[in-house]
Amino acid sequence: MTLGYEELLIVGFGNVGRSLAKLIAFKQEYIREKYGIDLRIIGLVDSKGAVVKPGGLTASEILKLVETPRSSLRLQKPYGKTYSSIVDVYDEVEPTIHVELTPPNYDDGEPGLSHIIHAIKNHVDVVLANKAPLALYYDKIMSMAIASNVRVKYKATVMAGTPLLNLVLGLKGYEVEYVKGILNGTVNYILTEMHENLVTLEEALQKAQALGIAEPNPAIDLEGIDAAAKIVIIANTLGLNIKLQNVVRQSIYNISLQDIRSAIRKNRVLKQVAQVDFNKREAYVKLEEIPLENPLAKVNGTYNAVEIGTSINKIVVVGKGAGRIETAYTILDDIISIALEKRGYR
Ligand SMILES: NC(=O)c1ccc[n+]([C@@H]2O[C@H](COP(=O)([O-])OP(=O)(O)OC[C@H]3O[C@@H](n4cnc5c(N)ncnc54)[C@H](OP(=O)(O)O)[C@@H]3O)[C@@H](O)[C@H]2O)c1
């Protein structure tokens, strides 16, 4: 079966971009045989430049590029280029799918927001792992996509390698009352360390940073912005238009060992919980003492978990919430789904 080809522009060539490029290089043949789709990478972009090859890079070219230093795409011969904006890249290649893997910026969504708007205006389908543009401008992006008849998929923005959003989209006949969960692996790791080893927040954070679980500047995680962005994306996916700035957030910076001990004495565990309540039409990220028998209490370390409460049942999903390889697999699934949907397959 041959259905055709998709030409991919991967914008952001860091941890996830490189894992995705490598995955595609290794799986090109498998995807061609199984789905009849030829996936070609025609452009890779980092913060300083790009590699652009109309027609597509070969697997061995891709595998060489993933080994190059960061920010060096422009120096890679013979396809390296500098560019001043994404428009320059689009002047050279015409992708069919734009994959946005730049870092999240919760001030204004840039550079991801402008990149995906440019893609949509050019009638190019979009796959996102960068959650900031969606968390800030879900409505705007989706309205533009509908008007331009473009698909926007973003499964990797929530729980990375665990396809929660697919499950959520499969609840069309249900009345979902709430979604609540542990959506930030860094914070959950820190709280688990504090609970299990009775260490201070500073000690747990230092350990997380040494292991690469926390960023040098962990504020986005510790202040609940990352968890809030994810709950906003879940809410909007289920049709509730909530904006990031309206999510009430509690930071974990003030947690002491006394708080942890107090929860332990009550047979509870302190967790950062993000929740959207569809009846009250509100969302928040706060610290909750969870009884040990609750499934969320057993979710430790960098794992994520979500409980979906409907009028007839509760569904709990547990899985890894981060990881470059898991994220790359989820993005690849979105890419293949777009390719198949375009051709009338589900
Ligand atoms: N890592 C995970 O497990 C995970 C899971 C789910 C979602 N995500 C999301 O996926 C995205 C990528 O994550 P990552 O871990 O790969 O981040 P990363 O390692 O920091 O890579 C980001 C990439 O974006 C590039 N970039 C920065 N500004 C740019 C600009 N203006 N134009 C073009 N490229 C630009 C960087 O260029 P340089 O190389 O030149 O610096 C780098 O290649 C983020 O939004 C992240 O939140 C990550």
Image (cartoon, rainbow, N blue to C red):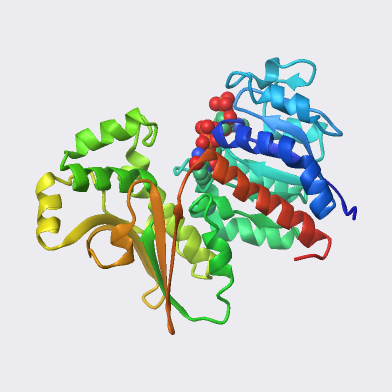
Residue at image point 48% right, 40% down? 105
Q: Residue at x 21, y 46 (%)?
A: 196
Q: Position of residue 120 (x, y in %)?
A: 71, 50
Q: Quadrant of residue 45?
A: top right
Quadrant hosting residue 287: bottom left
Q: Is residue 212 left or right of residue 88?
A: left
Seen from the viewer's position, the closer of residues 289 and 85 is 289
Q: Residue at x 52, y 61 (%)?
A: 164
Where residue 66 appears, as percent x and y from the top left, is 65, 26
In the rendered image, residue 333, in percent from the top left (x then y), is placed at 66, 52
Q: Is residue 130 left or right of residue 312?
A: right
Task: Tell me if I can see residue 271 in this picture.
Answer: yes
Q: Quadrant of the C terminus?
A: bottom right
| Tally of numbered discs | 0
**In the image: residue 73, left or right of residue 280:** right
> Could you say which is closer to the camera, residue 146 or residue 156?
156
The spot of residue 71 in percent (x, y) is: 59, 21
Residue at image position (74%, 30%) is: 88
Position of 92 relative to 145 (above/below): above
Judge whether residue 110 can be spotted in this image: no
- In the displayed structure, 30 sits above or below 297; it is above
